[in-house]
Amino acid sequence: MIVPMQKVMIAANAAQREEFLTALRELGLVHLIPVNAEAATPDEQTRHALENANRAVGVLSMVTSLCDTPAPRGSADELIHHTLHLHRTHADKLNRLTTLQRLVEQLGDWGDVRLDDLEALDAQDLPTSYAWVSAETVADVIAPFSAVLTTKDKGKLALVAAVGEATFPALATVLERPNRDKTSLRAEASEIETELKNIGHELCVLAGALATITDRRAELQTTADFQSALGGAHTEEALFAVQGWVPKRDVDKILPALEAKSIPAATNTLEPTDDEAPPSLVEYPTWVKPIKALFGVLGTIPGYREFDPSMIFMLAMPIFAAMLIGDAGYGLIFAAAGFFTRKKLRAATGDSAAGSMIIIFGLATFAYGALTGNYFGLSPWDMISAGSIFEPLGNVLKPLAALVSLNADGTINADSGNTITLKISFGLAGGQLFLAHFIQAIRLLPSQKGIAEAGWSVFFVGMFALVWGMFDLGSLGVISDSVIWILLAGFALVALFSHPSKNPITRLAMGVLTNLMPTINTFGDTLSYIRLMAVGMASYYMAVAFNGLAMQVAGDGGVLWVPAVLILLAAHGLNIFLCIIAVLAHGVRLNLLEFSGNAGVEWAGYAYQPFAITNKA
């Protein structure tokens, strides 16, 4: 739910401006809006120090502190300065190392010729030239003095140095004398590599002081926020005033909090106007909170006046993840990973949403994989046919998978699972897209645009039936006349009410013309959900292929079982990684684009960030 906001203007005595802002900061309710935006900035020293602290935290956050030495002593500012100095030095050394490697590559034609040898030739006070010639034409080099410095291609080519005026054979490749040789370049590169290792060790040691630097960053951020609030306020001789957004339920807490600090003040509250965009404060019911971790990763916030889709996401994403992964074994791995990392994730993010979300996705995937009979690419019937210790396991797992894998006569139907998956995919498409416009209709009714959204809901019912019939998934496909009438009825409502006008011709013309492309897009949006089945099948067949490859390597007697196990671990690890990508790419897309687009959610909001003491975490 998006919490209602009110715009609040608060005025106090200018002589108490700092005490006033300190009290507001301790209260932590007002999302400040600068009255004077140009002046709402910290001073140069604080801004520069905060930027340095942010960079230092960014550098050390990427360094794993595995050093045995204790964290270095010193003030936080000294540690920040030393961290940034090492980081700059590391970048410079790395650039120099890259340059040296490129120079070594450019000296490829010179082989391992040393610069000392070239300087000895230069000491003759005669011009020296160099060229690659074929071994057969070395004797054809005309010069007062010539010598072969090195050869390549098994002696077929020779690098000849000619002192004095020289004439080389026609096919010779003349070279420019280098200023460095490979030996010196490699020696310098080796020194830089050693220096980079030392810098890496120093950064590793400094990573132990990350908490100290993070605390300092929080202090600087608090100072910067205070200076920005001070500069952005409205100031007169005796008056100091700020404005901002406050949750409507908390407006009455402001004056008592200021009075408790002996700060006389006055407030004025206003409802947000249509041209104002208050910040979005989203509050999640307990059962919806896990999905907050996904929104945090995506950095998405619904606009203040938009529909909050978090409940729909929380219901849909576990199902989408389960279908895209589709493997009960993988589901157990995800659930275990979420369970064992939940404490670390809570420490890193400040809540348990991330760990809970992973566990829920894992359990949903396990349940779906069990229903479809897929355990690391093996079905219960595969286990039974394999015999040995797998047969009892297959018999235990078979009853659940048989719900979707057996014909009426009890025989195995390999296609039934895919058919059910396809039905679920399109069922989710129809249900979610219908719900998107139905919610819009509820929010907009009794306006005419609410009726248009109801028309879209009807249209998606018809589109769902049309796609269902196209894939021959059941009886809906034979009621084509009814489907056409449903589509026409839905489009009629959309065309007649999406552009209200007193002129019926204008109303109808605009309604038809502006909704032709959205009408076509409904087919693509519905069909887009087929990715749930397609990606899940791809993951399954990859697992099957990996299992077959491992079996071939192991052989009939299982002699090469060690490399076979390594293949299974690496291959299934890769497949699990691809499943994670699939959930983020396809599962998120269906919710963030298809559903949100039809629900009118543009994710145009910005977060409610009250003026408060910065959290050290």
Image: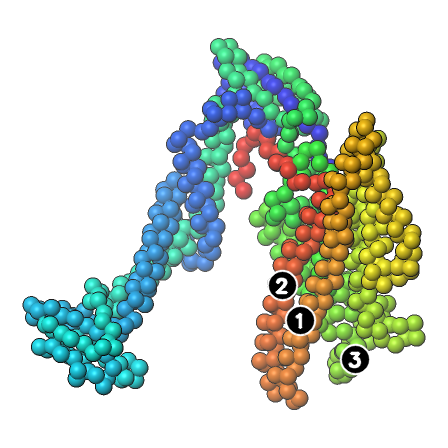
Q: Is residue 89 visible?
A: yes
Residue at 61% across, 87% down: 559
Does residue 185 appear left or right of residue 232 in this picture? Answer: left
**Rendered location of residue 346, percent (x, y):** 61, 49
Contact, CB < 8 Å: mark 1 with mark 2? yes
Tell me the amino acid under the disc marked 1: Met
- The residue where tag 1 is placed is 542
The C terminus, quarter of image: top right
Rounded to the nearest angstrom, the CA distance separating label 3 from label 2 is 29 Å
Question: How does the figure colour the protein chain or chains?
Answer: rainbow
Does residue 341 appear left or right of residue 209 in this picture? Answer: right
1 vs 3, front mark: 1
Numbered label attached to residue 384: 3
3 vs 2, front mark: 2
Tell me the amino acid under the disc marked 2: Leu
The front one of 12 and 403 is 403
- The residue where tag 2 is placed is 578
In this view, which residue lies farthest toward the front? Answer: 505
Task: Name which of mark 3 and mark 2 comes first in the sequence.
Answer: 3
The N terminus, quarter of image: top right
Mark 3 element type: helix
Rounded to the nearest angstrom, the CA distance separating label 1 from label 2 is 10 Å
